[in-house]
């Protein structure tokens, strides 16, 4: 039986080609009302010994694959033969992941899964990181998820030790900077913890990538969500701010809030206006990182740039879209929600049949609830 290593269910889009090392299983909090990923699974930590075995398996697959490389060329028939000879689908998946890691753009990064690796004892995490550096010396970036309230509890000394061991970046789903919103969605963190935890990470020299959900506060807390989120960004000065436009997923606990009248989801356009309001309140003298819309769930993926230089561009880009005739806005909305990764200026690139179908729907669905339901039928499928 071929050796395999464990792989968890999710990673940030920016870690698409990184190796995935499962250090913990599932989520220790697991109460967020918007998240459905871990609800049926209990949290477990894996032993350091088991994690080291997985790292050894990764190194073994790396060595086997590199035997089929001659300079810049790969012996693809030999690679395919070795791949097809593997004894299980799990072994094939592991082999494929290591090959992709070596060949598709980022053979220098590894991501530690699952939802909150930072909950481990610092000495355990240091041992794991150090072993990664030993067995996979080509690794230049080690990254992890970490919840804001967990980050706030870790000491400055431990953060510096983790950085010295080789932890380079932490991804943290802040979701909102508003205490009212955080409480409503049962995030299990406060604005104060977000700021304290984020500042500790940054002070230790570890890169910080934080995520926010425009629209997660609902119509009633839309302005609060925008302004308080900007306040956190200004206080923390993260390296990356990543937008994940909120969608009320079918089957999530947020549906209960909606049914009880405690939550009304903003429209697609209202979420975009909330993004604009948040960006407009970021202080480029305090926040100098990068804002990205690196997920298909965001309507305008081109809203991206340096916070200390590109805020005027991002605002003007949004304003240009908001100034379009409603039909043009709708045509792009639907095209985007159907999965076309286009700027609205590139709609002409669609097939005539697709464009005709999109235009017909955009013109003839006049009821706003029906229109939003159509858009939601597409966005509900994204993680």
Image (spheres, grey):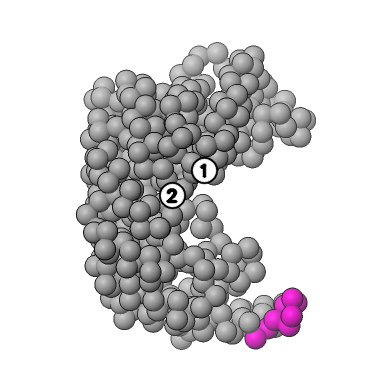
Secondary structure under tag 2 reads strand
Q: Are marks 1 and 2 in contact (CB under 8 Å)?
A: no
Q: Residues within 10 Å of mark 2 (few under 14, many from 20)?
A: many
Residue 352 belongs to magenta span: no
Horizontal side of 309 relative to 75 (left or right) equals left
Figure label count: 2
**Quick one: label 1, few (<14), some, or many (20+) residues within 10 Å?**
some
For this rendering, which residue is in front, 274 or 194? 194
Residue 251 locus on image (x, y percent):
34, 40
Q: Which residue is at a point 40% across and 79% down the rendered structure image?
A: 131
Q: Which residue is labeled 1 in the image?
A: 290
Q: Is residue 4 above or below residue 313?
A: below
> Which residue occupies 27% across, 59% down?
156
- For the residues labelled 1 and 2, the Cα–Cα distance comes to 9 Å
Along the horizontal axis of the image, is 207 left or right of 256?
A: right
Q: Is residue 27 left or right of residue 81?
A: left
Which segment is the magenta one? 67-75
Question: Which sits in the foreground, 328 or 242?
Answer: 242
């Amino acid at each position: 039986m071929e050796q395999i290593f464990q792989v968890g269910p999710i990673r940030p889009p920016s870690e698409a080609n990184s190796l995935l090392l499962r250090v913990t299983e599932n989520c220790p909090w697991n109460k967020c009302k918007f998240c459905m990923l871990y609800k049926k699974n209990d949290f477990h930590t894996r032993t350091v010994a088991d994690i080291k075995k997985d790292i050894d398996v990764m190194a073994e697959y790396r060595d086997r694959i590199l035997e089929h490389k001659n300079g810049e060329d790969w012996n693809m028939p030999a690679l395919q033969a070795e791949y097809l000879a593997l004894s299980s689908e799990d072994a094939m998946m592991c082999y494929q992941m290591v090959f992709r890691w070596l060949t598709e753009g980022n053979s220098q990064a590894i991501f530690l899964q699952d939802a909150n690796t930072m909950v481990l004892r610092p000495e355990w995490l240091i041992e794991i990181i150090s072993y990664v550096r030993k067995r996979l010396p080509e690794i230049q970036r080690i990254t992890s998820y970490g919840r804001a309230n967990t980050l706030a509890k870790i000491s400055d000394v431990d953060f510096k030790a983790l950085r010295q061991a080789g932890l380079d970046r932490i991804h943290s789903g802040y979701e909102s900077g508003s205490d009212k919103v955080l409480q409503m969605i049962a995030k299990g963190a406060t604005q104060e913890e977000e700021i304290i935890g984020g500042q500790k990470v940054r002070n230790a020299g570890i890169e910080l990538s934080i995520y926010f959900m425009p629209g997660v506060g609902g119509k009633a807390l839309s302005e609060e969500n925008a302004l308080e989120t900007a306040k956190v960004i200004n206080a923390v000065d993260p390296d990356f701010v990543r937008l994940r436009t909120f969608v009320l997923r079918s089957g999530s606990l947020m549906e209960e809030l909606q049914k009880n009248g405690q939550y009304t989801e903003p429209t697609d356009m209202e979420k975009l206006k909330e993004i604009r309001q948040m960006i407009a309140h970021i202080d480029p003298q305090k926040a100098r990182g990068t804002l990205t819309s690196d997920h298909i769930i965001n309507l305008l993926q081109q809203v991206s740039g340096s916070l200390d230089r590109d805020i005027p561009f991002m605002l003007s880009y949004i304003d240009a879209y908001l100034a379009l005739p409603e039909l043009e806005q709708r045509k792009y909305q639907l095209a985007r929600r159907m999965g076309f990764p286009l700027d609205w200026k590139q709609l002409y690139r669609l097939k005539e049949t697709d464009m005709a179908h999109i235009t017909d729907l955009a013109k003839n669905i006049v009821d706003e609830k029906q229109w939003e339901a159509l858009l939601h039928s597409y966005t509900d499928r994204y993680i």
